[in-house]
Image: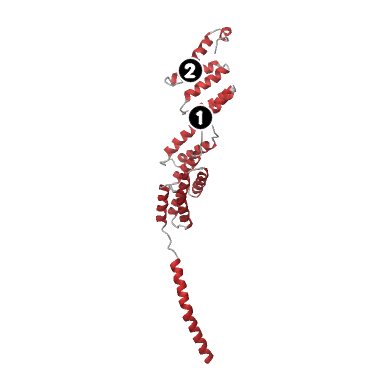
Amino acid sequence: MLCRGRGARTAAALFVVVAPIFLLVSGCASADKKPMPDPRGELAWADELVATKKYYKARMKLQEILQLGIADKELNSRAQIALADAYYQDGGTLNLAEALARYTNFLAFNPLHPRADYVQYQVGMCHFEQVYSSDKDQRQTRKAMEEFRKVGALYPASPHVADAETRMQEARQLLADHELVVGRFYASRKAYMAAIDRYRVILDRFPRIDDKPTVYLLLAEALRALERFEEARAYLKLLIANYPDHEVRPPAEQMLRKLDKKAAQPVGVASVIEE
């Protein structure tokens, strides 16, 4: 009985000592535990950071939001798109590549999302922003056109279709300018057949380019160099008839007069007429 009494008193003493410590530790743990941040408020904060061009801070905030594991799918989608936008708006090759990867990944998992049309347009813009001058490689230009074309094909009712078409026309002009640069290079090396092929590619593939009269004139010059006079005359007449006010009309008229004069002369005489 004596031993049992001592054991009970010892247990009671330990409880008196341990219980306050347990309560103190529990209280500290509760005090240290931070409440879950409101995702909507955090998103609004990230939007403000983007609006003030603090893109790096915005990206850090958006990544924190996504790491919370938001149950609301729409908020999660908003955060994903906003993060891609923050990379895109910051610009630069690396940021554009990261934005492209995030937009593409979003479309892979959310092709029917209400903002999928916008994301598809941004995929095109990521390529388009990496397009440089017409004398450089045009792979990004072609890829941009391919992605812009998808906006109208997949989302015909999208408000971004018109913008995509405008960008596509700009891309077509860049591609046409590139072909023009290459054609002129070949002509300068007297590789006239190669130059003619390039000029005809422009007329066949890019009929809405800005400077078609110049292409007609260059094509006529290359044809004349190969003594394909009738073809040259046909392009000059087309230029003069359809572009009466263009700056290349006077040289086109001068060339046509010489070719007409050559055509009117007997073969033996025409061969000595100065070109």
- On residue 251, which mark appears? 2
Residue 112 in sight here: no
Residue 50 in sight here: yes
Q: Quadrant of residue 159?
A: top left
Please name the amino acid that badge 1 sits on: Asp
Residue at 44% over, 35% down: 166
Residue at the outermost bottom position: 1
Residue in front for this viewpoint, 237 or 32: 32
> Which SS class for mark 2?
helix
Residue at 49% over, 86% down: 9
> Which SS class for mark 1?
helix
Quadrant of the image containing the C terminus:
top right
Q: Are marks 1 and 2 in contact (CB under 8 Å)?
A: no
Q: Quadrant of residue 228?
A: top right
> Badge 2 local density, few (<14 within 10 Å), some, or many (20+)?
few
- On residue 177, which mark appears? 1
Q: Residue 18: horizontal and vertical position, in percent?
A: 48, 78
